[in-house]
Image (cartoon, rainbow, N blue to C red):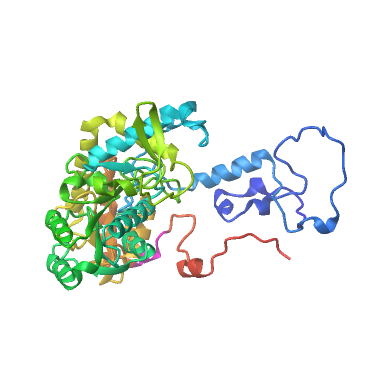
């Protein structure tokens, strides 16, 4: 370790800190805690050749550690510091009552291997959540085991595969996916060993029904399922969903629903009434549990009765003696250790009960109203590829700005200068220069107006002074990153120099 004459920590500005590692601040012998007195006989260390030399840990005082991480955390953009209109991700407010409930010692200090007799309250909560989600989706049974939306999808498709296999449909090798689906849908189908066939969208943004009919006519016996995102990633409701379900069922195939964005239709429509056999939810979107940075999620799956015997294990049931963890008769097995992300389930349960039935209905009303408000305010400045009322999000195209040499990436970076987290960009893939904006139901009209004002100002800048937009962000600690190098040659590990 190179010796440094003195501690330069206090001379670092907040900006320097972002590029500084704790290793750079390390001083030999500095320590952050008080070690207890030796209470065992002193022994000499093992021979030097057995000791790892490269195990270098930074040496810092406690105050330095606290300041270092506090300053870093202040540079993080979060839902608690600003609005976050990241389309498809439902970055809405996470009410603090959820945190209070999740921290109750009776929940927070449980051990997953405790006997069921001593965890009846927790199992009762899981059972209650299963019943509520079954009611909201209009399905018969729910599993809370999947730890993410994508894992819920995988569970759902494995259930479909097992069901078909048990009912003479084991030879069905294809899964159909509309081209407006979330990317995890085709990835899931491929991971479950299926061949993926894409169904195009029509001019209105619905699935092209004629293309679906053709695919089923050509190879109806080979199709296992259709995976449909509802609402679609265009933020649109599939108007012929009932007909689509009938077509699939007539050919012996199943209808899978991706309901990660159910905040768009909560309390308005039950997917079970629309013909879905299996449907997943994202508690970390629709039901306000925290997410981002890969944090813990939960992607429960809801199924109709014919698929219930195939649900993952463990599954909570209630019998005369109380709540029990069971393995459904033909279960696809475990998705992970223990019971899923229990802390997330507690938060979602608290959210649902604190809102009540009317409050849950109000979510979809506000989510849809807010997205349509943004659509109305921005429609003259940005091209609207599907000009119809949207649900929880609105997808614009930056193609007009692109003609002036300003790309959607530039618009997104410029929004950072105006203090907003950018929306999702370049997705869905079927929209050129896509800007996918999901304001969520938690933002006020004042915040929506400030966001729209910024988007309109950027549209004007793109006309009048495009260089400003192309040079953005100018107010962020770091400017444009070399994303290709970051992806291809990531530096993920610190190594001691020399
Ligand atoms: C977010 C999302 C997913 C994936 O959920 P994860 O929890 O990130 O795995 C799947 N489908 C849709 C429509 C989504 O918005």
- Residue under the point 51% across and 45% down: 73
Please state which of residues 131 and 367 is positioned toward the viewer in this rendering. Answer: 131
Is residue 172 or residue 422 the one in the foreground? 172
Residue at image location 44% in from the left, 41% down from the top: 339
Q: Taking 17 as reference, is 334 left or right?
A: left
The residue at 38%/59% (across/down) is: 413
Q: Residue 441: horizontal and vertical position, in percent?
A: 26, 42
Which of the 4 quarters of the picture holds residue 362?
top left
Asked if residue 20 is positioned above or below residue 220 in the image, the reply reads above
Magenta stretch: residue 470 in it? yes
In the image, the segment drawn in magenta is 467-473
Residue 246 placement (x, y as % from top left): 13, 57
Quadrant (top left/top right/bottom left/bottom right) for the N terminus? bottom right
**In the image, residue 37 lies in the stretch drawn in magenta:** no
Q: Residue at x 23, y 37 (%)?
A: 135
Residue 261, above or below 396: above
Residue 89 at least partly seen? yes
In the picture, the quarter occupied by the C terminus is bottom right
> Closest to the observer: 205 or 353?
353
Q: Which secondary structure class fits the magenta region best?
A: helix
- Indicate the position of residue 164 as horizontal and vertical percent values: 28, 58
Image location (x, y in percent) of residue 195: 31, 69
Vertical position of residue 110 compared to residue 287: above or below: above
Task: Tell me if residue 76 comes above or below residue 212 in the rendering.
Answer: above
Residue 104, can we see it? no
- 19 displayed left or right of 176: right
Between 95 and 163, the one nearer to me in the picture: 163
User: Which quadrant of the view contains residue 432?
Assistant: bottom left
Left or right relative to 428: residue 113? right
Total numbered labels placed on residues in the image: 0
């Amino acid at each position: 370790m190179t010796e440094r004459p003195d501690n330069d920590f206090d001379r670092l500005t907040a900006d320097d800190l972002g590029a500084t590692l704790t290793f750079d601040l390390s001083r030999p012998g500095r320590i952050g805690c008080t070690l207890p007195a030796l209470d065992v006989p002193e022994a000499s260390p093992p021979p030097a050749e057995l000791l790892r030399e490269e195990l270098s840990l930074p040496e810092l005082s406690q105050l330095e550690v606290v300041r270092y991480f506090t300053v870093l955390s202040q540079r993080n953009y979060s839902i608690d510091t600003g609005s976050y209109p990241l389309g498809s991700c439902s970055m809405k407010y996470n009410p603090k009552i959820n945190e209070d409930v999740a921290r109750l010692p009776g929940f927070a200090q449980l051990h997953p291997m405790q006997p069921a007799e001593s965890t009846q309250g927790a199992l009762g909560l899981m059972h209650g959540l299963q019943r509520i989600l079954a009611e909201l989706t209009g399905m018969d049974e729910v599993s809370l085991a999947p730890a993410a939306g994508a894992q819920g999808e995988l569970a759902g498709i494995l259930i479909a595969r097992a069901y078909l296999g048990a009912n003479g449909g084991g030879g069905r090798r294809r899964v159909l996916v509309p081209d407006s689906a979330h990317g995890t849908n085709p990835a899931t189908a491929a991971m479950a060993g299926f061949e993926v066939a894409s169904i195009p969208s029509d001019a209105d943004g619905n699935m092209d029904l004629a293309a679906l009919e053709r695919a089923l006519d050509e190879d109806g016996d080979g199709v296992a399922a259709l995976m449909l995102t509802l609402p679609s990633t265009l933020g649109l409701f599939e108007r012929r969903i009932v007909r689509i379900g009938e077509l699939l069922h007539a050919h012996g195939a199943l209808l899978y629903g991706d309901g990660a964005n159910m905040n768009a239709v909560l309390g308005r429509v039950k997917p079970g009434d629309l013909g879905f056999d299996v449907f997943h939810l994202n508690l970390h979107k629709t039901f306000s549990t925290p997410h981002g940075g890969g944090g813990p999620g939960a992607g429960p799956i809801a199924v109709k009765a014919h698929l219930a015997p195939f649900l993952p294990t463990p599954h909570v049931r209630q019998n005369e003696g109380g709540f029990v963890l069971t393995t459904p008769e033909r279960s696809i097995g475990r998705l992970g250790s223990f019971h899923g992300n229990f802390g997330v389930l507690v938060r979602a349960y608290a959210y649902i009960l604190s809102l009540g039935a009317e409050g849950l209905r109000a979510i979809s009303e506000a989510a849809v109203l807010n997205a349509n408000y943004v659509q109305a305010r921005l429609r003259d400045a940005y091209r609207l590829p599907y000009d119809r009322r949207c649900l929880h999000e609105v997808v614009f195209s930056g193609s007009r700005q692109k003609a002036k040499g300003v790309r959607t990436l530039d618009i997104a970076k410029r929004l950072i200068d105006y203090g907003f987290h950018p929306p999702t960009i370049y997705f869905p893939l079927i929209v050129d220069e896509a800007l996918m904006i999901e304001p969520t139901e938690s933002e006020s009209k004042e915040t929506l107006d400030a966001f729209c004002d910024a988007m309109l100002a950027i549209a004007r800048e793109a006309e009048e002074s495009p260089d400003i937009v192309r040079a953005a962000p100018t107010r962020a600690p770091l400017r444009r990153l070399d994303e290709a190098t970051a992806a291809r040659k990531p530096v993920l590990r610190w190594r001691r120099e020399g």
